[in-house]
Amino acid sequence: MQFLTHKDIGAAAKLPIGPETPALTYNPVILASPGRAVDIQVKVGAPAAGSDLPIVLLAHGQGRSNWLNSRHGYAPVFDFLTGHGFVVMQPTQLSAVSLGVEHGEGDELSWSDQPRTLRRILDELDAIEEEVPFLKGRMDKSNIAVVGHSFGGWAASQLLGASNTDKRTGATVCNFDERVKAGVILGGLGGAEGLQDGAQAILPFFGPDFSTMTAPALVVCGEDDFNPHFCRTDAGWHAEPYRLAPGPKELVWVKGGKHGFGGISGWDTNEVDDEGPERLFFVLRMVWAYLRSALVRGDGAWGEAVKMLGGAKELGTVESKE
């Protein structure tokens, strides 16, 4: 079976990957949310067969598109993971352009609601299992990871233990969730000191502390992911969730990668300026390998991927710390 690949996958084909299987999607699950501007809407997917399936929460980024910054985006990630052994749950955050929710001072981009939304999904796993016909008895609710891109990477960082102190009020918020065993941060946010003045105006609440991010995580950065209008430094700013957090952590640098990582937010999207099947499948396979080894006892996919990458450095490099 061969459905999630491309003739131009190139050197990414050297990386390990499990068998591909058909997947099912149920969209949306609606979680009633009194007091929230809109009820939580979740896209749920899973392999068509199998049991004891680990769970991945998928947190979308922001961006300028009409639909990609919602549960309708990130099809390459969603499809790849559901087709390779994971249950994936992807909510639409209140920051989605399609919702048109006004965000007042103190909750710009619904930043405080984003990690709460992810945690609410975990609270409702039994209800979701009851509603989605193909999930009954198939999930391993003790094996949960979070994957987030860009601003969604900041939501993921918080579930993994990073805290935020709003410099306007001095209030510190922590959304660490012990149910989340590991995570992947793709092009995530670094420290507040690296933000340009204009970016600080957009994110006035932003004051992260990664020293408390104790859960295991993979941080993925593009070597060319630098926006001078947003960041004062260079692409290394996106590596700060790795540099400033305690281990165990892994860091993958994507050769030639920008913020789109080859196209993770959608198929053939204009939002991506580094699109390419080889880069995309390199990122997807590394994410899959990390999640497999993080959530499945005795799985050696990550070690194999790191070893194979040593012979395919045109794709990227990896660092690690305990």
Image: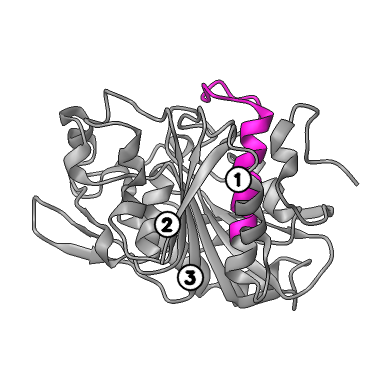
Residue 209 colored in magenta in the image: no
Residue 281 colored in magenta in the image: yes
Residue 184, x across and y down, in percent: 49, 55
- In the rendered structure, which disc, 2 or 3, sits on the residue that comes first in sequence? 2
Cβ atoms at labels 1 and 3 below 8 Å apart: no
Q: Report which residue position mark 2 lands on.
A: 156
* C-alpha separation, residue under disc 2 versus residue under disc 3: 10 Å
Residue 171, x across and y down, in percent: 13, 62
Badge 1 element:
loop
Residue 232 vs 236, above or below: the answer is above
Marker count (numbered) = 3
Which picture quadrant has residue 55?
bottom right
Q: Report which residue position mark 1 lands on.
A: 310
Q: Classify mark 2: residues with Cα within 10 Å, few (<14), some (14-19) or many (20+).
A: many
Question: Quick check: can you spot residue 35?
Answer: no
* C-alpha separation, residue under disc 1 versus residue under disc 3: 30 Å
Badge 2 element:
helix
* Front residue of this view, candidates 92 and 178: 178
Q: The residue under label 1 is which amino acid type?
A: Gly
Q: Is residue 314 left or right of residue 177?
A: right
Q: Report which residue position mark 3 lands on.
A: 180
Residue 122 vs 87, above or below: the answer is below
- In the rendered structure, which disc, 1 or 3, sits on the residue that comes first in sequence? 3
Residue 88, x across and y down, in percent: 63, 58
Residue at 48% of width from left, 35% of height from top? 98
Badge 3 element:
strand
Magenta span covers which residues?
A: 267-290
* Front residue of this view, candidates 74 and 321: 321
